[in-house]
Amino acid sequence: MAERWSLDVSGKRIHLSVRGGCGGTTFGLHTAVSEIQSGGRVLWASPDMPNASRFSQLFSSLNIVESSRFHALNLIGAMDRCVDAIVEAERSLPRVGLIVLDDWCTPTGRIEKDHMDAVLDLAKRIDDSTTLLLITKSGTNVTGDHEAFRARSKTNFEKAQFEIWGLYANERGEIHLDMNGEVLIGKIEESGFVF
């Protein structure tokens, strides 16, 4: 069996801009499994839990004890209060290595100011060694240029020292992961990403 693809994201602040439905949540779950397999703990915050069948496919490599290191938090209500709850969980649970915010803002248009302020505050308040992964739908390209993805609020994230990554598919259905200009090309399988 081929070795599972993983990526060292330790201590990074990542804004993952996802075009279409090409696997943003799957990427987050894949990264979560890698963190748990390396002995860490994951805080997952989203308005909804990931698709149950996709979740079980990706987590099938973990035993019950390992799976218990995945903690889901509901992103409902005022974003600053949600951030307070995430910070409290990170401080009270041992070995939190990854915090994922999935679908944390509106899917289109400008990211709401209160949401933006709250996630930038979160990035400052969590431990420097904890990875923060924000999964956001890409913006709409209205300029007519041929960029592969359009990260929303890019300037704000760059000022806050976030890496801007993109996830998109080409016309052949290949998945591209653009990590600050370094692009991996692959596909999604039952167990997650293969690059």
Image (tube, rainbow, N blue to C red):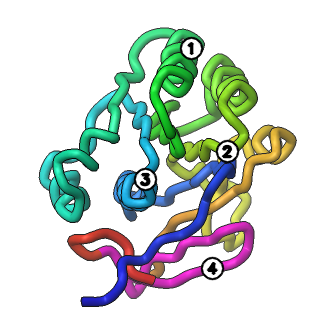
What kind of element bears circle 4? strand
Q: Which circle marks residue 183 in the picture?
A: 4
Q: Residue 37 in the image: x percent, y percent? A: 37, 59
Mark 4, other Cα within 10 Å: few <14 / some 14–19 / many ≥20: some
Q: Quadrant of residue 73?
A: top left
User: What residue does disc 3 label?
Assistant: 39
Image height of 149 relative to 172, above or below: above
Q: Earlier in the sequence, mark 4 or mark 2?
A: 2
Q: Residue 98 in the image: x percent, y percent? A: 52, 44
User: What residue does disc 2 label?
Assistant: 129
Q: Which circle marks residue 84 in the picture?
A: 1
Image height of 61 relative to 35, above or below: below
Do tag 3 and tag 2 residues touch (Cβ < 8 Å)?
no
Q: Nearer the viewer, residue 159 or 61?
A: 61
Q: Earlier in the sequence, mark 4 or mark 3?
A: 3
> Which mark is in front, 4 or 3?
3
Image height of 41 relative to 172, above or below: above
Mark 2, other Cα within 10 Å: few <14 / some 14–19 / many ≥20: some
For the image, the number of numbered tags is 4
Q: Amino acid at mark 4?
A: Val
Q: Amino acid at mark 2?
A: Ser
Q: Amino acid at mark 3?
A: Gly
- The span picked out in magenta is 171-188
